[in-house]
Image (cartoon, helix red, strand yellow):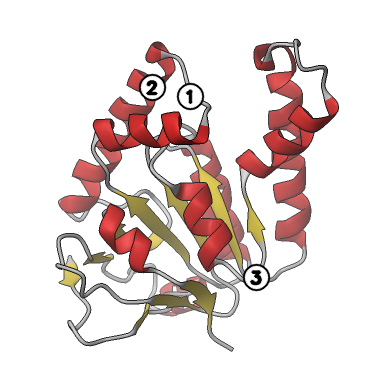
Amino acid sequence: MNRTTACATTTGVALPQQPAAQAREARGALPAPVVRDLRARDGRSPRALLFGPRDLVVVTGLPGSGKSTLMRRAVRGARVDSQDTRDRWDGRMPRLLPYAVYRPLVRLAHYAGLRRTLRSGGPVVVHDCGTQAWVRRWLAREARRRDASLHLLLLDVTPQQALAGQRARGRGVSRYAFLRHRAASDRLLHAVERGGLPAGCGSAVLIDREAADALRRIGFTG
């Protein structure tokens, strides 16, 4: 595993491109995964993360960790956030109707919107709750198809921070759902820390709440 960190004075970090074409040219030898750990940097985190012109970025972490907040602030191009889809549906549904009733429709609309965005061929930042591994597999296939890379941006926050984030936004998940998310997030985090990226991911960036707050841009070169 290539484990690198940004220089303390760096204002932006560029993630290496590892397109599928290069892997094919290497007769099946996959590039070594790249993990950048930007946690616990005492306020010296980079202000920008830059990826390739056709790359896909998955932002994952616990519910309440700040994924949607980060995406709204830092992503200036195409982004697909399930929270945006839910907000649109919430605005159309009767206030007394429980979300669980129309949740399947929200999910269907979210994935349909993701599919439409991917078909444009441009770079995309995607919100991932962490429990839907099949979504990352889907995005990995799409990255290979377009000879680009899939990158993982993982928000590592404590359960207490995530629960506080849910309270701050006035919307939470059930205890059962939170425990499921926590177990999936812990497995993914521990795997990435050991250099075991999900299949198809070319790189991963680990950030804590402080590093997330410092980010002002998640962008793409070219």
For the residues carrying marks 2 and 1, which lies nearer the camera in this image?
Answer: 1
User: In which quadrant will I find the N terminus?
Assistant: bottom left
Residue identifier under label 2: 178
Q: Are marks 2 and 1 in contact (CB under 8 Å)?
A: yes
- Residue 208 is situated, as x and y percent measured from the top left of the image, at 26, 54
Disc 3 from disc 1: Cα separation: 28 Å
First in residue order: circle 2 vs circle 1: 1
Q: Is residue 35 left or right of residue 119?
A: left
Q: Is residue 16 left or right of residue 160?
A: right
Q: Nearer the viewer, residue 64 or 52?
A: 64
Identified by mark 1, the residue type is Gly
- Residue 39 is situated, as x and y percent measured from the top left of the image, at 20, 60
Q: Residues within 10 Å of mark 3 (few under 14, many from 20)?
A: few
Residue identifier under label 3: 77
For the residues carrying marks 3 and 1, which lies nearer the camera in this image?
Answer: 1
The disc placed on residue 172 is: 1
Identified by mark 2, the residue type is Phe
